[in-house]
């Protein structure tokens, strides 16, 4: 959920009505996510989806990695800018929900470019030797710092990495947080800010996106 959605819904509606329209396949997927899942708020929001779409279209990446598929909304946004010979690997561990993203991936015009894996992301990153042009992480917050360490060797100059939920509903302002996820998100934000190999900016979009570019 976004800050404006919770605190100022009128502003949230204003932001949505002044953004590019949402493709029909994404509207259908968003509707079905709210109908058939118990935590529909986990879906990437409409505004965030527009950001992912625009970043992908500007980069035209050949190799994209997504950690945390959920129902596939962000995946389809990220595919929109893929190079003609490009692909996206999207990882999740929820077998019970896998039918839903698979349904929409097959319906998508990018079906042949999406590799959906039910696999632990840490295992995948330790095994792969691929280099990624664009990475989006939106799962398993308690492993965010470890994901950053594992992802760094899989990037090159110009690679873009985005971590979602890095403001954690404002909990990052807590001096001594008791919740492990808050502790790790704060650790991630500190690691990124101190890493001279990246330039970054935390975008206060929805629940915060840490936007990184490899120098």
Image (cartoon, rainbow, N blue to C red):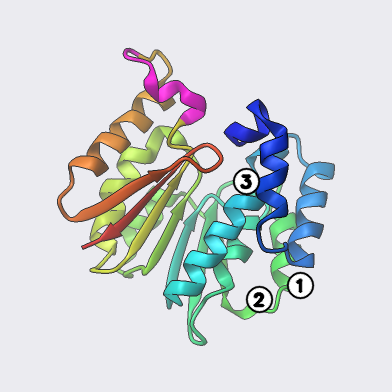
Q: CA distance from mark 1 to mark 3?
A: 20 Å
Q: Which residue was labeled with disc 3?
A: 94
Secondary structure of residue under mark 1 = helix
Residue 127 position in % (x across, y down): 33, 60
Residue at 40% x, 65% y is 134
Rounded to the nearest whole Å, what is the CA distance between mark 2 and mark 1?
A: 7 Å
Q: Is residue 76 above or below residue 14?
A: below
The residue located at (62%, 34%) in the rendering is 4
The residue singled out by tag 1 in the image is 107
Q: Indicate the position of residue 202 as horizontal and vertical percent values.
A: 38, 43
Looking at the rendered image, the disc whose residue lies closer to the viewer, 2 or 3, is 2
Label 1 close to label 3 by CB (< 8 Å): no
- Which of marks 3 and 1 precedes in the sequence? 3
Looking at the picture, how far across and down is residue 84, in whole percent? 52, 87
Q: Residue beneath label 2, please?
A: 111
The segment highlighted magenta reads: 168-176
């Amino acid at each position: 959920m976004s800050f404006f959605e919770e605190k100022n819904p009128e502003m949230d509606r204003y932001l949505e009505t002044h953004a590019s329209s949402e493709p029909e396949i994404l509207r259908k997927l968003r509707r079905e996510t709210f109908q058939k899942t118990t935590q529909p708020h986990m879906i990437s929001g409409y505004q965030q989806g527009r950001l992912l779409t625009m970043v992908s279209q500007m980069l035209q990446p050949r190799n994209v990695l997504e950690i945390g598929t959920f129902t596939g909304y962000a995946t389809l946004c990220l595919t929109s800018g893929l190079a003609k010979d490009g692909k996206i690997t999207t990882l999740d561990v929820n077998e019970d929900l896998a039918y839903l993203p698979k349904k929409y991936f097959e319906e998508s015009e990018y079906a042949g470019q999406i590799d959906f894996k039910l696999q632990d992301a840490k295992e995948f990153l330790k095994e792969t030797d691929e280099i990624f042009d664009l990475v989006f992480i939106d799962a398993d917050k308690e492993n965010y710092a470890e994901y950053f360490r594992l992802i760094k060797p899989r990037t090159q100059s110009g690679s873009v990495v985005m971590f979602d939920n890095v403001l954690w509903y404002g909990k990052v302002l807590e001096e001594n947080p008791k919740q492990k996820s808050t502790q790790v998100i704060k650790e991630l934000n500190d690691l990124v800010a101190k890493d001279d190999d990246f330039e970054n900016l935390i975008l206060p979009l929805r629940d915060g996106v840490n936007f990184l570019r490899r120098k």
